[in-house]
Image: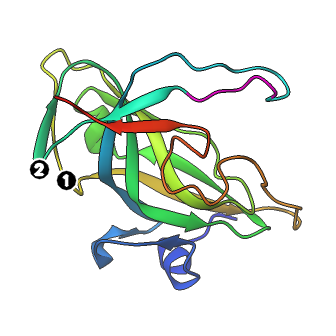
Amino acid sequence: MILSGLEVITRQLVRNLRHTTQQQPCGVDLTLREISKWTSPATIDFDNTKRQAAKTSLLAFDNTITLQPGADLIDFNETVHVPLNCMGSLFPRSSLWRSGVGITAGVADAGYEGALGALLEVKNPHGLVLHRNAKLAQIVFEELGETVEGYSGIYQSSTSSVGQDGDRKPSKV
């Protein structure tokens, strides 16, 4: 069963909301906090013994920023607290894909608590102008058929999407 936006907010599964208008019928809108560019390669393996997150650099902007075609890492203002009997999925808002922009993110596993981020891909050859706190994605929660042990990976309790093994530096741009 998918939880309504009202139930998600009532149960405080999404926190740090900017405004009550973020509640939607089937989820909650997520808003832009910051944008980063990758500055190094990442290492991914099977058992995480060699895993190393890519280093990133924050893009400085006051109220607006113009992004050219390409990929960026975005972090949302909102954080989540996913119960052990739920999972979350992130979807782009329709105004993005109608503008030639996509968002890709992983599952918010049962038991995960912390920051949310996503890959933002600007495909529009003319770019994208973003305002701070822009509504970019929607998180939808589904109840599982049973309570599970829950997530306990490196991103647990993260304050940004680079995770605990990531490295982020302010941009020099």
Q: Residue at x 65, y 19 (%)?
A: 43
Q: Residue at x 77, y 20 (%)?
A: 45
Q: Number of marks in the image? A: 2
- Left or right side of 172 for 97: right
Q: Residue at x 24, y 57 (%)?
A: 133
Question: Where does label 2 land, which residue?
Answer: 62
Q: Nearer the viewer, residue 128 or 94?
A: 128
Name the spot of residue 70 as percent of width and height, x first.
30, 18
85 lies above or below 164: below
Q: Quadrant of residue 125?
A: top left
Magenta part of the chain: 49-53
- Left or right side of 154 for 5: left
161 lies above or below 38: below
The kind of secondary structure the magenta stretch mainly shows is: loop
Distance from disc 2 to disc 1, alpha carbons, whole Å, reads 8 Å
**Image color mode:** rainbow
Name the spot of residue 136 as percent of width and height, x first.
32, 48
Question: Where does label 1 land, which residue?
Answer: 132
- Left or right side of 137 for 2: right
Q: Amino acid at mark 1?
A: Arg
Name the spot of residue 99 as percent of width and height, x first.
22, 31
Q: Secondary structure at mark 2?
A: loop
Q: Is residue 42 magenta?
A: no
Nearer the N terminus, badge 2 or badge 1?
A: 2
Q: Secondary structure at mark 1?
A: loop
Label 2 neighbour load within 10 Å: few <14, some 14-19, many 20+: few
